[in-house]
Image: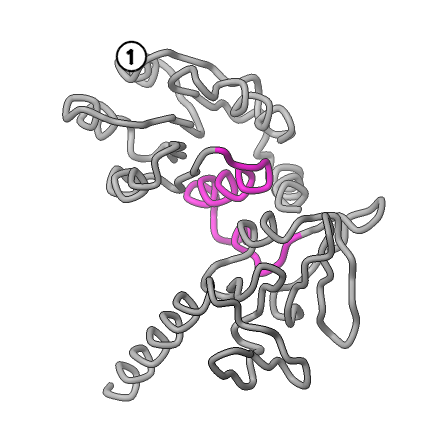
Amino acid sequence: MCVDYLKSISANSGYMDQQCLIVEQAIVAEFRDYLKRLPFFSLPEVCNSLAEAQGLLQKKSYELICLEVDLLSQAELDLIRSFPRHIPLVIASSRPEMALEGFDLGAADFLLKPFTFLRFTRAVNRALSTQVTSDLLVDHPFLFLKKGHSFQRFNYGDIDYIQAYGIYCKIYGKQKVDVVNETISNLEQALPSQQFLRVHKSYIVNLAKITEYSYRTIAIGSHQISLGAAYRERFEGFLRLLGKKGEDTGGE
């Protein structure tokens, strides 16, 4: 899982005892519990308001800010913009429309409540990658997933497609099948969206491995995967985007 890769980063880089500031109370317990499971964070500091957070940020140094937002006034937006820009910000909200506002504020990632531990570790990974040097390879093209009682490394390029298998998933690639202890929804959140796309309630495909497609099916080699009606528009949108990129490249 992502957290195991984060452990390896912290162990090899001296990146330990990071201090996180949590702003607001509603999901403090969730933030705090998840941070406890990451070995390189010390106990987070918690404040109840943006004004209090601004005061703390003027006195102390932090490596991460976790902020819960719903509706923000202009004054509150200005307060967030006054936060030190070098400290990565992770924003959580129950309102999906706040995502655009969050990224406009410079957030490293946006979490839609409720969110899983796997999704949270992905957000922390992305946030910390803004601080560490490139040789740490925070965005390395792999992740660790639990298989039985141990964790196995899966390179993105080796994954052909993923099939839901109850509360588990089957990962197909390199002419073999691995069963991992993750749901398909968790894997959809953990895998990079520019490379992997959910095309059916039971399937995620590696876009680079698609060899043929039609209105109802996608082929990866000799295997035919159903293209779910609920996912068809998104898949077709991706294909249009690819076509536009191809046209742009061809015109250069």
Q: Is residue 105 above or below residue 42?
A: below
Spot occupied by residue 99 in the image (x, y as percentages of width and height):
32, 42
Q: Position of residue 191 (x, y in %)?
A: 55, 56
Q: Decide: few, some or many residues near mark 1? Use Cα within 10 Å; few <14, some 14-19, many ≥20.
A: few
Query: Which sits in the foreground, 104 or 141?
Result: 104
- Name the residue at 59% across, 23% down: 33
Residue bearing mark 1:
55
Identified by mark 1, the residue type is Gly
Magenta segment boundaries in residue numbering: 114-143
Q: Is residue 115 magenta?
A: yes
Give the residue drawn at x 56%, y 17%.
Answer: 43
Q: Residue furthest left?
A: 74
Q: Residue furthest front?
A: 229
Secondary structure type for disc 1: helix
Residue drawn 54% across the image and 18% down it:
29
Left or right: where 246 falls relative to 195: left
Left or right of 132 on screen, residue 221: right
Residue 55 location (% of width, % of height): 29, 12
Task: Tell me the quarter of the picture where residue 60 sits.
Answer: top left
Q: Between 57 and 121, which is closer to the camera in this rendering?
A: 121
Q: On the rendered image, what quadrant is the C terminus found in?
A: bottom left
Residue 202 figure quarter: bottom right
Residue 233 or residue 6, whichever sits in front: 233
- Can residue 233 be found in the magenta stretch? no
Q: Residue at x 39, y 73 (%)?
A: 236
Rendered position, 145 above or below 112:
below
Q: Residue furthest bottom?
A: 250
Q: Is residue 36 above or below residue 187?
A: above
Quick check: 47 left or right of 154? Answer: left
Seen in the picture, residue 11 relative to 37 is either above or below; the reply is below
244 or 203, which is in the foreground? 203
